Amino acid sequence: GSGRMRNMTTNYYDMVRLQELEDSKRSVFGRISTILTPISRTLAWMGFVPLHPEAPLRVILDIVCLVLLLLDSIMMPYMFAFHVSLKDVLVITWIACIVWMLDLILNFVTGYVTSDTVVM
């Protein structure tokens, strides 16, 4: 009797928590969508959207990101170990920041590959 009622109550509260979690996700993704929609519309107007995952622009950006990742993995420990000032590597830092932002934006408008097809 009371065990079944407790399970029903627990299940109800679990469902309420799940609904609250889904609502919070929607609000966060809604905010992100609000920010990225004008960017994706501009990219569509320029003819970039949707971007094929193997498009030359995407491949070049992936190679640049790989080089920057290797550079970051060497430079960051070097900077911390030898107390290098950020002023000394300011140009590289800004270039890396701009490339990472561009990569993030393009990831939102790039298709992806499933087991046998490309989804755009």
Image (cartoon, grey):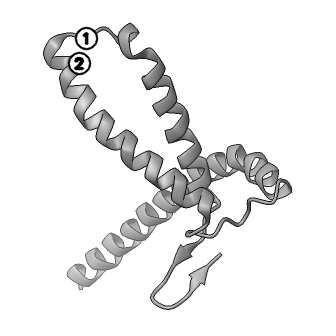
The three-letter amino acid code for the residue at tag 1 is Val
Tell me which residue sits at (80%, 53%) in the image: 41
The three-letter amino acid code for the residue at tag 2 is Met
Element at label 2: helix
Name the foreground residue: 105 vs 85.
85
- Seen in the picture, residue 46 relative to 118 is either above or below; the reply is above
N-terminal of the pair, mark 1 or mark 2, is 2
**How many residues crowd mark 2 within 10 Å: few (<14), some (14–19), many (20+)?**
some
Q: Which residue is mark 1?
A: 84
Q: Is residue 23 visible?
A: no
Q: Which residue is mark 2?
A: 79
Q: Give the x, y percent position of residue 9.
A: 35, 72
Is the C terminus in the top left, top right, bottom left or bottom right quadrant? bottom right
Q: Give the x, y percent position of residue 106.
A: 61, 53
- Seen in the picture, residue 87 relative to 49 is either above or below; the reply is above
**How many residues crowd mark 1 within 10 Å: few (<14), some (14–19), many (20+)?**
few
Is the N terminus in the top left, top right, bottom left or bottom right quadrant? bottom left
Distance from the alpha carbon under mark 1 to that under mark 2 = 5 Å
Would residue 101 appear left or right of 76 to someone viewing this image? right
Name the foreground residue: 74 vs 44.
74
Tell me which residue sits at (16%, 13%) in the image: 82
Element at label 1: loop
Would residue 108 appear left or right of 21 to someone viewing this image? right
Name the foreground residue: 84 vs 63.
63
Q: Assess whether mark 2 and mark 1 are in contact (beta carbons under 8 angstroms).
A: yes
Q: Give the x, y percent position of residue 85.
A: 31, 8
Q: Is residue 117 visible?
A: yes
